[in-house]
Image (cartoon, rainbow, N blue to C red):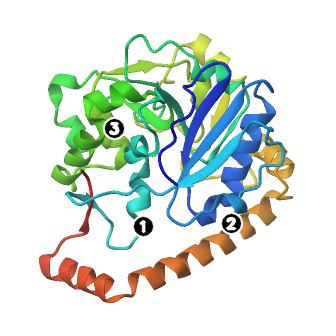
Amino acid sequence: MGPLNSMKATSAAIHLVTAADAGYVPYLSTMLTSVRHNLDPEVRLHVTVLTRDLEPGVIRWPNRGPGDSLRSFAPDIPPGSVLPIGPDDHLTIDTYHRLFLELAFDEGVDRVVYLDADLVVLGDLSDLASIDLGGKTVGAVMDFAIRRWGGPRTCEALKSQTQHADRSYFNAGVLVIDLDAWRRKRVRDSAVRFLFENQGGIHCWDQDALNHALGGDWCELDPRWNRMCSWERPEFPDPPFSDEVMASLSTPNIVHFTGRRKPWNDDRHEARAHFDQYVTMAGFGSHRMTWLKGRWLDMKGWLRERRRRYTLRGAVRRIRRVLLGTSVRAVVLP
């Protein structure tokens, strides 16, 4: 499907972008169900899923409104750049789809909301979509576990820029994006260049790259719009925000399942109750059954990827990586 050219993001319509593969269908379905459940029924939701292997028909969205739309979009990344791909295939091109989200929209769409699939929305998303960015390109929340460019958990590629040591570092799982400014600033090109030049000095891949590309050109949002889980770290003895702000996080607008622990694989996860409410509403039953269904879909996606890889072209790429001693492969960028 080609770029979307429908209405701008207003109080009557929201353009929501996310990214997922086949194994994440239960969690994507849960996220979308939570968004619609808490959204003003008069607001239309236009959802774009950035993916290579996911068709809209497999996504469960039982409370989808009559004016809502759902489509998948595979960014047609043309030749030109190299992105790091892990030799163990943990990283794939799918990891970077968020960088290319502008390709999914014509210039008639000037604002989008990006949400990771591993979260639930508890507030009215139209409040987030219409927020004043103060002339900045992106609205985001400071990452609870990384915090600053000069912090102990920041990647070396950013930490080495000592002149920006006090600059805040944002989490890219919830973004409000001014697409016109994003394009003018050439965020995509800058992020891809940073990845290519710093393959050995980054930790969070496209998130590190977006922090570099945007620099200070982002508006810090109320942390309730991205209440992260599993953020406590021994490197930070103090909480990330003031006592007043930390207290407000008991009533979040979005709960983001950051970290390796997820509510579908950890019975003691702090957000299990929120997840269980919406995964049940989405029609996936218990969290354990959701995990099993996710693994089955993941296996099907894995088999498709193996078929895609084990072609002559794939064999040439793997031999080339071995001979050149590198863990990257070329992808396309205009």
Residue type at numbered disc 1: His
Q: Is residue 203 above or below residue 21?
A: above
Q: Looking at the image, which is closer to me, 57 or 274? A: 57
**SS for tag 2?**
helix
How far apart are labels 2 and 3 at the CA level?
29 Å
On the rendered structure, is 320 left or right of 133?
A: left
Residue type at numbered disc 2: Gly
The image shows residue 36 at horizontal and vertical percentages of 76, 35
The image shows residue 177 at horizontal and vertical percentages of 45, 28
The residue lying at 23 percent from left, 37 percent from top is 158
Task: Please give the residue where the numbered disc 2 appears in the rendered image.
Answer: 294
The image shows residue 303 at horizontal and vertical percentages of 54, 82
Q: Looking at the image, which is closer to me, 37 or 280? A: 37
How far apart are labels 1 and 3 at the CA level?
20 Å
Disc on the earlier residue, 1 or 2 = 1
Q: Residues within 10 Å of mark 3 (few under 14, many from 20)?
A: many
Tell which tag, 1 or 3, sits nearer the viewer: 3
Disc on the earlier residue, 2 or 3 = 3
The answer, for residue 270, to whether it is visible in the render is no
How far apart are labels 1 and 2 at the CA level?
17 Å
**SS for tag 1?**
loop
On the rendered structure, is 16 left or right of 306?
A: right
- Mark 1 and mark 3 residues within 8 Å of each other at the beta carbon: no
The residue lying at 55 percent from left, 18 percent from top is 222
Tell me where residue 186 sits by quadrant: top left
Task: Please give the residue where the numbered disc 3 appears in the rendered image.
Answer: 210
Disc on the earlier residue, 1 or 3 = 1
On the rendered structure, is 280 left or right of 240?
A: right
Task: Please give the residue where the numbered disc 1 appears in the rendered image.
Answer: 90
Residue type at numbered disc 3: Leu
Q: Looking at the image, which is closer to me, 263 or 216? A: 216
